[in-house]
């Protein structure tokens, strides 16, 4: 018997706001424990929450990117439960009226587009972080109250691949909109998967299993694929699937049991009494959408259709928001878009890898990269000179033309002069031409080496090679 997987995802996204969802405590990742807190974060009696305006804007931007209906009133609810990571004994969330509802995004699977429906997007606050040791647990309240959006899909995915591509698209949206850094390894984007299976043709859902806290996009796909096989094997053996919460063991590449679910938890939701409903006017929503940074799909379309960059290079540029932003800054000084892309992907990326830094730490001004690319494109310098100028540029961050002038990098562009020197080199040893005609191409390289030596490397290699071949064949 063949089975069909029914998959739904819940994605928690930490927002990149300066302060927390309901307090003025700052947000800085990696600070000393319990230093980024206010009395509200510690649940002191008498403290009152206030809604973070920027967090609301961020939520609206993601709702718009996901084609959602946006609620023009903000309502918050209390989700009541007692756990050590929840200071107040309740979490402020949006249960009854999420800010966004009934959206979708499109992914491509096997060359075909598939629309994946999204049920809701709501805002809430994060819990504090627990650090477990052998016989005790420490609590860090720095994370308590950080603004979150939770994006809940409908159970419309059918494979690990679809789920992976869905999360990749969500991550693109939240990172390029500057809502979140999307770093799963730091917990900025966390994913829970709900998965069940049923025989093909059945319209009934099977018993749902939840896999919690998946910390990488590849692990999401692996966990789902494993669960499909595990649940299928149980049913084929005539065994029942239990409603469980599981986690993914990365070393074993399989899901393992955390706890068995019995009854659904009653969180006793009720409307948050300390935050009255907040009306959002059309102008506020329009401004949030209009001021949203350019999203991945829009940038890709611009790179491919307006800038005529090839598909592979365009997607490499878009591997990170910061790299794409740097490319755009360079492109504002030059319209040699493909040449700029080539230079950034090869020369600049090689430098970043060598220095073990990101493009954010790259100190060279974009206008100087554009200037260097134009020098190379117009063949005022050759690639060897270009590399030398780039190395100096990384140290001094000044005009490539200034460096070119200092070093005396002026290419010999007179074909007749280059040809004259090539003739002299060939004439100095008759065996050079004979060896070349006999198929020994090393003689061509020898002539090139001698030419570079005689001219101090001030010849364009492409032009020189053409002349060398012509003279060797005479």
Image (tube, rainbow, N blue to C red):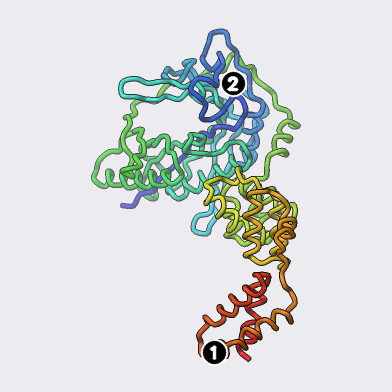
User: Which residue is more in the foreground, 212 or 310?
Assistant: 310
Q: Is mark 1 in CB contact (under 8 Å) with mark 2? A: no
Residue 38: x percent and y percent? Answer: 56, 16
State the count of labels: 2
Mark 1 residue element:
helix
Residue 51: x percent and y percent? Answer: 63, 22
Who's the residue at 48% across and 17% down the image?
A: 87
Q: Is residue 236 left or right of residue 473?
A: left
User: Which residue is more in the foreground, 299 or 323?
Assistant: 323
Q: Which residue is mark 1?
A: 431
Q: Is residue 74 above or below residue 89?
A: below
Mark number, residue 25 = 2
Task: State which quarter of the image contains the C terminus.
Answer: bottom right
Residue 258's image quarter?
top left
Residue 44: x percent and y percent? Answer: 53, 10
Residue 199: x percent and y percent? Answer: 35, 48
Mark 2 residue element:
loop
Note whether residue 43 is visible.
yes
Q: Earlier in the sequence, mark 1 or mark 2?
A: 2
Q: Nearer the viewer, mark 1 or mark 2?
A: 1
Who's the residue at 36% across and 45% down the image?
A: 198
Q: Is residue 262 left or right of residue 423?
A: left
View extreme (top): residue: 46
Q: Is residue 97 left or right of residue 132?
A: right
Label 1 crowd bin: few (<14), some (14–19), many (20+), radius 10 Å: few
Who's the residue at 34% across and 46% down the image?
A: 226
User: Which residue is more in the foreground, 324 or 281?
Assistant: 324
Residue 97's image quarter?
top right
Note whether residue 268 is visible.
no
Q: Is residue 119 above or below residue 456?
A: above
User: Which residue is more in the foreground, 15 or 405?
Assistant: 405
């Amino acid at each position: 018997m063949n089975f069909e997987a029914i998959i739904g995802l819940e994605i928690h996204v930490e927002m990149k706001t300066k302060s927390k969802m309901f307090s003025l405590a700052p947000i800085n990742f990696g600070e000393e424990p319990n230093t980024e807190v206010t009395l509200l974060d510690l649940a002191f009696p008498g403290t009152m929450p206030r809604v973070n305006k920027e967090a609301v804007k961020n939520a609206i931007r993601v709702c718009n990117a996901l084609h959602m209906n946006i609620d023009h009133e903000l309502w918050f609810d209390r989700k009541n439960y007692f756990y050590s990571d929840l200071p107040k004994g309740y979490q402020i969330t949006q249960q009854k009226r999420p800010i966004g509802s009934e959206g979708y995004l499109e992914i491509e699977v096997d060359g075909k587009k598939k629309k994946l429906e999204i049920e809701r997007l709501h805002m809430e606050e994060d819990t504090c972080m627990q650090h477990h040791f052998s016989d005790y647990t420490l609590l860090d309240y720095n994370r308590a109250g950080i603004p979150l959006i939770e994006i809940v899909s409908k159970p419309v995915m059918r494979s690990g691949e679809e789920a992976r591509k869905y999360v990749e698209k969500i991550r693109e949206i939240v990172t390029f909109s500057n809502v979140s850094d999307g770093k799963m390894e730091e917990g900025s984007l966390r994913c829970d998967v709900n998965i069940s299976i049923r025989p093909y043709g059945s319209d009934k859902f099977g018993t749902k299993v939840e896999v919690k806290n998946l910390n990488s996009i590849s692990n999401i796909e692996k966990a789902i694929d494993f669960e499909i096989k595990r649940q299928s094997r149980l049913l084929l053996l005539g065994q029942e699937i239990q409603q469980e919460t599981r986690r993914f063991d990365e070393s074993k590449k399989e899901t393992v049991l955390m706890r068995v679910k019995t009854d659904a938890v009653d969180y006793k939701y009720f409307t948050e009494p300390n935050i009255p409903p907040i009306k959002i006017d059309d102008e506020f929503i329009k401004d949030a959408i209009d001021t949203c940074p350019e999203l991945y799909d829009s940038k890709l379309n611009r790179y491919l259709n307006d800038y005529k960059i090839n598909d592979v290079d365009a997607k490499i540029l878009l591997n990170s928001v910061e790299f794409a932003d740097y490319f755009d800054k360079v492109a504002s000084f030059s319209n040699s878009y493909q040449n700029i892309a080539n230079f950034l992907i090869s020369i600049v990326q090689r430098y970043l890898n060598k220095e073990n830094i990101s493009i954010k730490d790259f100190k060279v001004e974009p206008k100087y990269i554009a200037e260097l690319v134009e020098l190379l494109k117009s063949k005022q310098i050759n690639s060897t000179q270009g590399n030398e100028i780039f190395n100096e540029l990384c140290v001094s961050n000044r005009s490539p033309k200034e460096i070119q002038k200092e070093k005396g990098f002026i290419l010999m562009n007179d074909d007749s002069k280059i040809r004259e020197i090539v003739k002299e080199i060939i004439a100095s040893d008759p065996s050079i031409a004979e060896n070349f005609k006999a198929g020994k191409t090393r003689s061509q390289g020898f002539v090139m080496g001698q030419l570079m030596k005689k001219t101090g490397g001030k010849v364009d290699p492409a032009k020189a090679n053409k002349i060398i071949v012509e003279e060797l064949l005479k």
